Image (tube, rainbow, N blue to C red):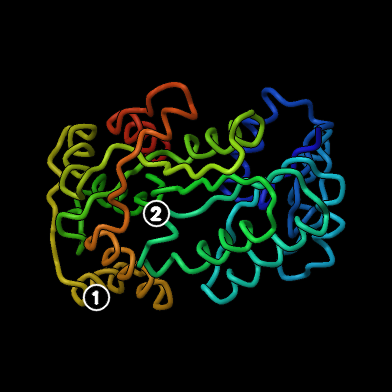
Amino acid sequence: MKLLVTGATGKLGTKVVEILLKSTPANQLVVSVRNPEKAEGLRARGVDVRHGDFDRPETLDVAFSGIDRLLIISADGDNETRITQHTNAVEAAARAKVGFIAYTSLANASESKMFLAPPHQAAEKAILKTGIPYSFLRNNWYLENEIASIQGGLAGAPWVTSAKSGKVGWAMQEEYAEAAATVLTGNGHENTVYELSGKLLTQEELAHALGTVLGKEVPVKQVDDATYADIMKNAGVPDFVIPMLVEIQKGIREGALEIESNDFEKILGRPLKPIDKALSQLVSGIS
């Protein structure tokens, strides 16, 4: 049985591979990476490191050759680029006659109006078109996405948001990685859609939980989108990133991540880490 993880040197991919190596022999594990030199540490541990570039389909044909079960971790970048990259990866998997595809998608992807949704919609459609057994891992939101705000809270700054009362199903990246590894190696996940969401919380509730961890109040500053953009600019966020952050806040405000589900617990066979414990772990990593 050959398992392959794409994007294995990225933040999520690295965690997935480390979890897999705890239970999977290294000689059964293959990683596909854009820059193989970044994965030399994995090669030294017996992992088959292959060059696979989502922008160059011919590299994927070689990378995916002989693979039984594949985890496609969604790429980064603008929507148009990601749609092409994801489609390239799926079509290469079909040519390689891969037996199973797990794909890291977005909460409620097929119905989502969030600006991040189109590349995930395109990938899910492309996978369905292949007829290959699949699992869509619809990841809600990484708690690590809030590290800048957590650092601000540590420094005494308010928690700034324009998301109003919109709720998010935050969970730690390592928990999303464990779910992906479990689905990739487990049985009974063919043709499934998992909404991987933690307990739904508002920005106020998350800031309150952070305040409890820090032992001090973290005030919440609700602003409009234009003010949010100005605050991000003044905080040194690069100009090209700011519109994306504003759109994320807008999506949360409009309920795009308000997806209630116990799929996480079903896959992991245990509850997720409580939000205060998760925040404590992130805070101890920062400070």
Residue at (60, 30) in percent of width and height: 188
Residue at (26, 74) in percent of width and height: 229
- Which quarter of the figure has residue 90? bottom right
Rendered location of residue 267, percent (x, y)? 49, 29
Task: Relative to 175, say whether 156 is above or below.
Answer: below
Task: Relative to 58, say whether 37 is above or below.
Answer: above
Left or right of residue 194, residue 97 in this image: right
Rendered location of residue 238, percent (x, y)? 41, 73
28 and 283: which one is in front? Answer: 28
What is the C-alpha distance between the residues marked 2 and 1? Answer: 30 Å
Mark 2 sits on what residue?
108
Rendered location of residue 282, percent (x, y)? 38, 37
Q: Secondary structure at mark 1?
A: helix
Task: Relative to 48, say whether 81 is above or below.
Answer: below
230 and 9: which one is in front? Answer: 9
Q: Could you tell me which quadrant the N terminus lies in?
A: top right
Rendered location of residue 203, percent (x, y)? 20, 50
Residue at (31, 74) in percent of width and height: 233
Counting residues from the start of the chain, the first of labels 2 and 1 encountered is 2
Neighbourhood count class around disc 2 (C-alpha, 10 Å): few under 14, some 14–19, many 20 upward: many
Mark 1 sits on what residue?
230
206 and 264: which one is in front? Answer: 264
Mark 1 is on which residue type? Asp
Mark 2 is on which residue type? Asn
Q: Are marks 2 and 1 in contact (CB under 8 Å)?
A: no
Left or right of residue 170, residue 65 in this image: right
Residue at (27, 31) in percent of width and height: 276
Q: Could you tell me which quadrant the C terminus lies in?
A: top left
Left or right of residue 77, residue 96 in this image: right
Neighbourhood count class around disc 1 (C-alpha, 10 Å): few under 14, some 14–19, many 20 upward: few
Mark identifier at residue 193? none
- Which quarter of the figure has residue 225? bottom left
